[in-house]
Amino acid sequence: MSMLANATMVTMAPMGPNANRPGNTSVKEVTGTQLRDLEKTLPLRVLSDADFKHWQTYGYVVVKNAVPQEQVKATVDFLWEFEEKDPNDPKSWSRPQMRDHAMTELNNSGMVEAYHHQSMWDNRQTPRVYDAFVDIWDRTDLWVSIDRANLNTPNVGARAFDGFIHWDADTSQYPLPINVQGVLSLVDTNDDMGGFQCVPDLFANFADWLATAPKDRDPFRPDIANIPYEPKRIPMQAGDLLIFNSLLAHGIRANRSNQTRIAQYISMAPATPEEQELVDWRTQSWSERLPARGHAFPGDPRNWEQTRYDRAKLTPLGERLLGKTPW
């Protein structure tokens, strides 16, 4: 049985006094039928039946070869350049982050404050990426999130970082919020390289766990030491897209290797063209190369996207995913 009614109302993600919470307000949070309870009406385009079942049970799915390797390389080259680091000179990797994060758990996690480079938009407007999110949402009128990337060099010395697990959705809300997130791996990862981690068994048993969870718990950070489920690292290869439910506890592992983990964050959600302020902001963000809004997105203090890089060219699909052209 669904945990929520079959409504399709949308509500704005937290802003104002709640701006210090995780989340990305470039798209709306949705209320209605939880995605784990969704019954498909559209044929699957990218996911298999087994993929979709795994997604609904454990809260994540990996889409293999979501973008071509030439796009992967273009994005990787840009991110090294943008971070002023040399992939062939590990001495350059210890360069301090350019701006501290108000969300302190992100400090030294390798977040790259770039949002609108052409290579990033090329990945967003790749049809296979879009089709995977159509499978997840069971609808075609989607907007892509305005989000950044991650270049996480080994977490040693001045870049010490122990990893984290959190929710980007407020798990104390009733009805529970509905949203999805995604991460495109731009390198092959191994156990020591950090990268994405999550607690899929907690998602699978979320309703039962929630019924017995302490009333004073932090709704954004699970107490990993006192839950009966272990975090798992999800292996990925360059070009793979991992899509996960926002109710899946997740985070970044510490990079204990001598290699660099590189990824781009890409998600999609139902378009809300009736929200003119949001349409205008999204279009302005692309046009002027602005960062996402919110506590978690400090932006680039050098303003390189505005001064060094051209506005990204959009395909017809990209214009619809931005909201510049209506569906």
Image: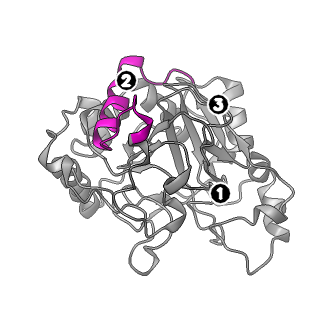
Q: Which numbered disc, 1 or 2, marks the residue that appears first in the sequence?
A: 2
Q: CA distance from mark 3 to mark 2?
A: 19 Å
Whether residue 72 is in magenta: the answer is yes
Please provide percent x and percent y for residue 29. Answer: 48, 59
Q: Is residue 327 visible?
A: no
Whether residue 61 is in magenta: the answer is no
Going 24% across and 30% down the picture, which residue do you hit? 316
The residue where tag 2 is placed is: 73
Tag 1–tag 2 contact (CB < 8 Å): no
The amino acid type, in three-letter code, at marker 3 is: Asn
Task: Write the start and end of the magenta stretch as one range.
Answer: 64-91
Q: Please state if 201 lies on the left or on the right of 83 as rendered.
A: right
| Location of residue 82 by image quarter | top left
The amino acid type, in three-letter code, at marker 2 is: Lys
Secondary structure of the residue carrying numbered label 2: helix
Q: Which numbered disc, 3 or 2, marks the residue that appears first in the sequence?
A: 2
Q: CA distance from mark 3 to mark 1?
A: 19 Å
The residue where tag 1 is placed is: 165
In the rendered view, tell whether residue 251 sits above or below residue 232: below
- Mark 2 burial class by Cα count in 10 Å: few <14, some 14-19, many 20+: some
The numbered mark at residue 190 is: 3
The amino acid type, in three-letter code, at marker 1 is: Ile
Q: Which numbered disc, 3 or 1, marks the residue that appears first in the sequence?
A: 1
Q: Please state if 182 lies on the left or on the right of 93 as rendered.
A: right
Going 25% across and 64% down the picture, which residue do you hit? 277
- Mark 3 burial class by Cα count in 10 Å: few <14, some 14-19, many 20+: some
Q: Please state if 177 lies on the left or on the right of 147 as rendered.
A: right
